[in-house]
Image (tube, helix red, strand yellow):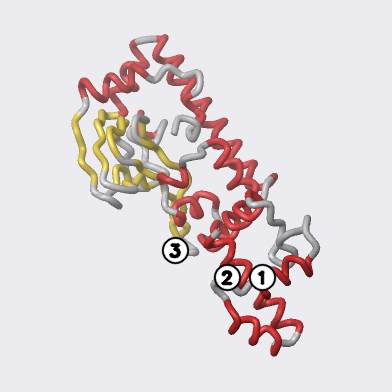
Amino acid sequence: MDAFNTYKKGADLQFMVDECLNRGKVLQLKKDETLERAGEPARWIGFIKSGYLKYVVTNPVEEKAYNTGFVFEGELVADYPNCLYGKPSEIDIVAGVDCTINVIKGTTIQAMYEEDPHLMNIGKEIGEGLFMQTYSRFLNFYRTDASTRYKQLLQRCPNIVQQLPLQEIASYLHVTPVTVSKIRKELLGKERGVTSFSDPHPQQSRPLFWGRVINHNHTIFGAKIQKQFVKCDILHKKLLLNAIFCILIRFS
């Protein structure tokens, strides 16, 4: 999942990884346990050996938590740069599943920065990369809609839908799970060459498609559906056809 956290591009993070693995301590976090809590001093920089964690901010008015980012196995996790100075954390860092993490104190890394100008430059690169990643995400909330943001996420990280539950992705996109589900169905329909349920086969004449569905005695619908269809008014016929089409797509 290297493409998710773009701040890493161009930054040599190996020294941090080595510090975590060689000098750090191992933490075992259960799902929903926290590595950092908002408002409390940020302490840790960690290397994730298994699992994933999410950055979470809570809206006190809505009394609702939102995911602002994720970090996956093989990546570094921290409330950076607050952890370098022990400043209050801006976010909760929460285990999305059971996790194993090697952690060191952020103040240890800050001491290394102060002793080595080369490492200090790497620290600046990390800060700049995080700023650009956050800035781009901020602007996307204004210049794109939810559907576009979801498509961009899939283009960047095609496997993310296998790693994260739908509700986690919805929270990250700042939409409801129902909205994400609708976007997924829309994309699935386009992959199958379907533009809408009202005109499911635009390249065929509508009577041909409808006749095929209604009169095909060897489908799962059979004669009973035909009989009910004849009794329906125009509106209900359209609704019935849409329902039939959805079932055909589901089992095709």
Give whichever of discs 1 and 2 has the lower sequence position. Answer: 1
Gap in Å between the C-alphas at discs 1 and 2? 8 Å
Q: Secondary structure at mark 2?
A: loop
> Which-is-in-front pick, marks 2 and 3?
2
Q: The disc labelled 3 sits on which kind of residue? A: Glu
Residue pictured at 64% horizontal, 41% vertical: 139
Left/right of residue 154 with respect to residue 168 in the rendered view: right
Residue pictured at 44% horizontal, 63% vertical: 63
User: Along the line of sight, which residue is nearer the eye, 55 or 184?
Assistant: 184
User: Along the line of sight, which residue is nearer the eye, 236 or 209?
Assistant: 209
Q: Secondary structure at mark 3?
A: loop
Judged from this view, the residue extending furthest toward the bottom is 231
Q: Secondary structure at mark 1?
A: helix
Q: Which residue is mark 3?
A: 63
Q: Which residue is mark 2?
A: 219
Quadrant, the N terminus: top left
Q: Horizontal and vertical percent for residue 218?
A: 58, 71
Gap in Å between the C-alphas at discs 2 and 3? 50 Å
Label disc, if present, on residue 213 of the rendered structure: 1
Tag 1–tag 2 contact (CB < 8 Å): yes
Q: Horizontal and vertical percent for residue 250?
A: 54, 62
